[in-house]
Amino acid sequence: MNDPAGKRTEAAFRRSRWPGWIWAVPIAALIIVGWLALRNIINRGPEVTVTFASAGGIKAGDTKVRYRGLDVGAVEDVRLAKDLSHVVVTLRLDNEFDHALTQGTRFWIVGANIGLENLAALKTIVSGPYIAIDPGPGKPTRRFTGLEQAAPVAAETAGTRFVLHAHELGSLTQGAAVKYLGLNVGVVESDRLVDQGRGFDIDVFIRAPFDKLVHAGTRFWNAGAVRISTSDGLSAQLVSLPAIVSGAIAFETLPGGERGPAAKPGDRFELYDSEQDAVGAPIGQTISYRVQFGGAVGDLRPGAPVMLRGFRVGEVTAVDFAYDARKDRLETPVTLELEPARLKLDGASPAANGDWTPVLNHALDQMIRQGLRARLGRTAPVIGRRIVSLDVVAGAPSAHLMLGGKEPEIPAAPSGDIAGLTAQAGAIMSKIDAMPFVAIGDDLRQVAAQVKGITASPALRQSVDHIERASAALDRTLRLVNGRAGPVLKSVDEAASEAQQAAASANTVLGGAQAEQDRDLPHALHELAGAARSIRALADYLDRHPEALLEGKAGSSQ
């Protein structure tokens, strides 16, 4: 456009400091990304390092870290240690776990080992393994050593830990249940070999409030094995499948022991092989005695019970044999430990130092003077295990408790089990001797004489002969009578039958050995009398009415 003066207008170009609104979008994006990165840095959880013996199937970027079923972190890196002895795993956890990373915190891989003793890990076959975390107390740290197996008890669980000592571990494994009256109240946490390889210490945890049931007198025993016992007859102890696989421990407090204080954490207890061994374990002081058995004792084992009138009063602690050159004989000494508490010595008190030895020695000496002897026996005939029984032997020679040796000696019965059989045989013979055989023989002879006198009577023989002749005559007569004499024939036939029965009974009586003489003789005589009366009545009737043989009784009355 030209102005009137004829001058042209020119546009002026000037660079602006603002790049333009089009750049607002990438700038905003950069701001958002920066903010997210900063937030991620600020909110990023702690990083920890855990060493495991093996990777167990875990993978970086895939394996999760879980606590009570929730994902609380992930595996960032898995690498082999420089010395190739273990695997180093780097974990990234949520911020919520920053305060829980202490020395007491535990990590383990769930699903690395799957078996019958770890059925809860079966679901990891599909989902894959994961790392479990259990926070615990202690100082903060970022480096941990992972457990080879799952922690059996959560760190925050209330309860008490005890130590059990066992000679054999058996089927017990970590995670085995601890039971009280069949209820799961605890768990086996770990076990270790001690006593230079001669035993095991087992750490058990019992949850509250059941830990208050453990006292100084509590007995623990192995309850996981399937056992067959012959102690009180044949019986079997069957347990659940988990107990068969991983084992189980049961405990119970002896009567009266519950009145004492509860056991303290870390207290030690003996782990017995069975409930029977636990209940029969010694109570209080034990006193050793020796018995010299005359026969073989090789199948008697230490731990066998010592019984007195059916009650356990001690146990066998040693079985040995030795040749005594001074006596020129082979001896089989057996050492027993008797328990004064089980003998219940009423009215007696121990010495000032609590020693029951003088009291028990005096009591045993008095019982031995009355015939008490030690003998070998079995808990059940033939199949039962060997025991030592203290029994009173009738007619035993005079003896007493022999002192002066290493242990006081209790005399043994003559020959172990043979003495028992002899005593039984003697009891049977005593009963047989007490039977009145002489009086029984005299009674039998009297009965036999009476029967013989009756059967030898001439009158009885004549009666029988007369009846036989009369029966024969009647038979010949009746065969000549025609059918019209039916009623008469019937009466005659009945009479003949009675006569025959009487004759048979009489012959039976006369037969002797095959007859029940005392019972059949009165019956036979009664039948003879009845038959005689019937024949006499028939003879009288025929004498008055002879025509009845041809016309019958009815015809004769016309």
Image (spheres, rainbow, N blue to C red):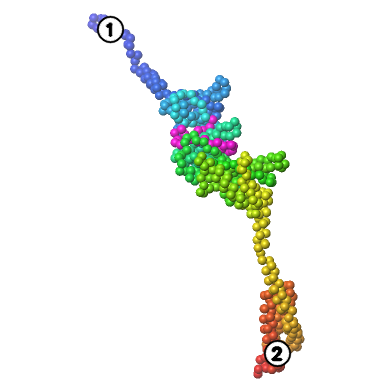
Vertical comparison of 158 with 556: above or below: above
Q: Secondary structure at mark 2?
A: helix
Whether residue 511 appears in this view of the structure is: yes
Earlier in the chain: of badge 1 and badge 2, it is 1
Q: Label 1 crowding class (10 Å Cα cut-off): few <14, some 14-19, many 20+?
A: few
Q: Are marks 1 and 2 in contact (CB under 8 Å)?
A: no
Residue range highlighted in magenta: 148-173
Three-letter code, disc 1: Thr
Q: Indicate the position of residue 395 as horizontal and vertical percent values.
A: 65, 54
Q: Nearer the viewer, residue 325 or 172?
A: 325
User: Which quadrant is home to the C terminus?
Assistant: bottom right
Quarter of the image holding residue 460?
A: bottom right
Q: Which residue is mark 1?
A: 9
Q: Indicate the position of residue 153 as horizontal and vertical percent values.
A: 48, 35
Tell me the distance, in whole angstroms, between the alpha carbons under discs 1 and 2. 192 Å
Vertical comparison of 526 with 347: above or below: below
**Farthest residue toward the bottom?**
558
Residue 158 lies in the magenta-colored region: yes
**Residue found at x 46% / y 39%:** 262
Q: Indicate the position of residue 27 as horizontal and vertical percent values.
A: 37, 18
Q: Which residue is mark 2?
A: 539
**Residue found at x 52% / y 37%:** 269
Count of numbered marks = 2
Quarter of the image holding residue 195?
A: top right
* Residue 148 horizontal side relative to residue 558, left or right: left
Q: Indicate the position of residue 451 as horizontal and vertical percent values.
A: 71, 76
